[in-house]
Amino acid sequence: MKRKLVKQGLRALTVTIPSSWIDKNNLHAGDEVDLIEVDDSLTLSTEKKQPTKEITVDVGGLLPRMADRFMARSYQKGYDKITVKFDDPELMLAVKNKVPELMGFEILNIGKSEIEVQVISQQLDLDFDVILRRAFLILMDMAKTCHDAWKSNDKKSLENIFHQDFDVNRFLYFCLRYLNKSQKVMNFGRSILYYLIESLEDLGDELKELGRQLAGIKPDRDVLDILDKLNEMFRNSYEFFYAPDKSKAVRAFKLSKEISALIDGALAVKNKDLTKALMSIELSTRIVYHLTTMRLDTLKELSGDK
């Protein structure tokens, strides 16, 4: 939308703010807002306390897994109070078991056919960047465990990857909720960052499944070599994400091609169980490679900046 600048005094200019934005952010005359200057843009934002956002849904007739996903999405979208009606104890358990993954949420009441969950702290004293980096590091450790524990035939460590994925979900759910509720400007781009975080959540699920698969089969030298390259690629992409560098981008591309070729060769000779593991590795590789491609626009060499 466009607004005209109105002269105010000798040097000042004023502009009106859309009433819809004022109402949405619960603002009143005299309240303070933040003006953030980024290049040629000026962004108006507010961290003013928002009205409580509530939702009530009847999940009767759904599968427990669908109730689980409903809770995750409601949390990520910024709801502060979630009331779930159910007709099956399994649905109640699915909701109840999901709450520990939702940072800041607690169960307030469980009835015969209804469960109420609500945020107990509107503003968690957590730093978005720190939480996102922590999720990255846990995922890297999960990938490393898949290689190291399988190589040493440590089935217990492979099975325990499940618990690491729990922490990954908690941190990434928080990041998605933060993006939906915060008015702060994200230099990275809110939409692309949202997609990246969801991709990281998928990676956690894939590594959890890979750990489960590897725990039931004997170590294979060829597949271990592929896992080793996946770990190298993950470290490279992680470093590129926080410090974009052309050589790392090129290395990520070459590693993705090497891994793909090795997987294609292994699929032709490996048994059914190893084939499933290779498919998980292939999907994980694609996700990790996206960490690099989503940051290519930040390379100074591509922009011509010196």
Image (cartoon, rainbow, N blue to C red):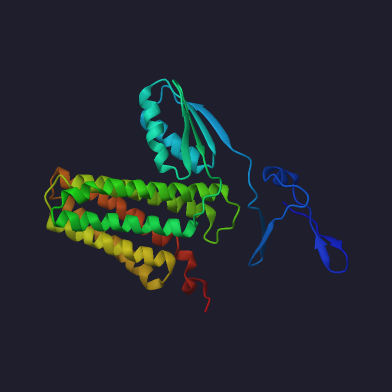
Q: Tell me if 39 is positioned left or right of 280 in this view.
A: right
Q: Residue at x 51, y 33 (%)?
A: 82
Instruction: Give the total number of marks visible in the rendering.
Output: 0
Image quadrant where residue 261 sits? bottom left
* Whether residue 262 is visible: no
Name of the residue lying farthest toward the right: 9
Describe residue 176's horizontal placement relative to residue 221 as left or right. Answer: right
Front residue of 87 and 225: 87
Q: Residue at x 27, y 59 (%)?
A: 230
17 horizontally vs 188: left or right: right
Evaluate whether residue 99 shows in this view.
yes
In depth, the one of 177 and 205 nearer the eye is: 177
Nearest to the observer: residue 293 or residue 291: 291
On screen, 110 above or below 35?
above
User: Where does the image place residue 268, in percent across and percent down from the top left?
Assistant: 15, 50
Residue visible at 32% across and 64% down?
235
Residue 278, image x, y percentages? 22, 50
Residue 16 at what x, y percent from top left? 79, 53
Q: Position of residue 222 (x, y in %)?
A: 15, 58
